[in-house]
Image (spheres, rainbow, N blue to C red):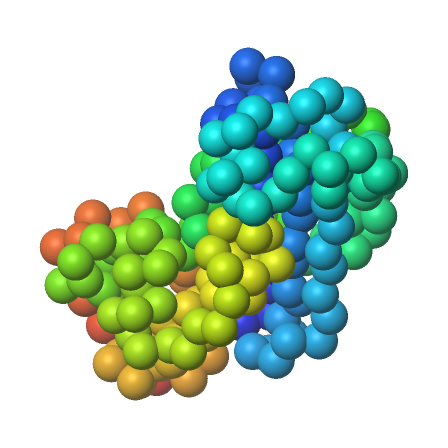
Amino acid sequence: MLASSIVVLDFETTGLSPDQGDRAIEIGAVKLENGIEVDKFQALMNPGRRINSFIENYTGITNRMLAPAPSCAKVMAEFADFIGDSNLLAHNASFDSRFLNAELARIDREVLGEFTCSLLVSRRIYQDAPNHKLGTLINYKNIAADGSFHRALFDAQMTAKLWLKLLDDIRERHDIEEIPFSLIKRLAKTPKAQVAKLLSNYATKIRS
């Protein structure tokens, strides 16, 4: 499975932790096949209670917008069908994966693919970046951004653009034409000082 064939997703939520009772309020995702966007998904969902003013201001999602939205259960069932068994990507995936797993568990569904994290990968490939926040990296790589961060679909689209740029840079720097998802999984766990060696060794292996 190639790293360029993946579902890139982002949640907006009522807070930081599903373990503390927080719920999803919006999901956005884009489906990439060989680096091309072939489908997208966006939906607000009603968490069953009011959200606080901080979340309203942070996301731009209001209680008025959520009142007529479908339930989390309905939206997440549709989203589970959308992702199928695809591998998954998010910027700071530990956050989004926790909410995805928690919301799917409520409807007796589960994640079938594997997750990886563009934040962890960017720390290894763009070691000179000022920081590794999504907005900072979009500017750092001169990626065009026309929209509002902290809305799920826009963040997912920006993460997808960043991801494809990351993969392009790995290809160019290390002469690796096709980047498998398994290599990215190893890369995300590799100490920064060992990244160049890992990619060089992989490039040598596939040419031998």
Q: Measured from the top left, where is residue 49 in percent x and y?
A: 72, 21
The answer to which image quadrant residue 140 occupies is bottom left
Residue 48 vertical position relative to residue 166 in the rendered view, above or below? above
Is residue 128 left or right of 94 when viewed as pictured?
Answer: left
Residue 196 in view here? yes
Image point (42%, 78%), residue name: 144
Q: In the rendered image, which quarter contains the C terminus?
A: bottom left
Q: Measured from the top left, where is residue 24 in percent x and y?
A: 65, 34
Image point (56%, 46%), residue name: 60
From the viewer's side, name the closer residue of 96 and 66.
66
Number of residue marks: 0
Image point (44%, 67%), residue name: 163
From the viewer's side, name the closer residue of 67 and 35.
67
Image point (73%, 37%), residue name: 64
The answer to which image quadrant residue 197 occupies is bottom left
Residue 82 vertical position relative to residue 177 in the rendered view, above or below? above
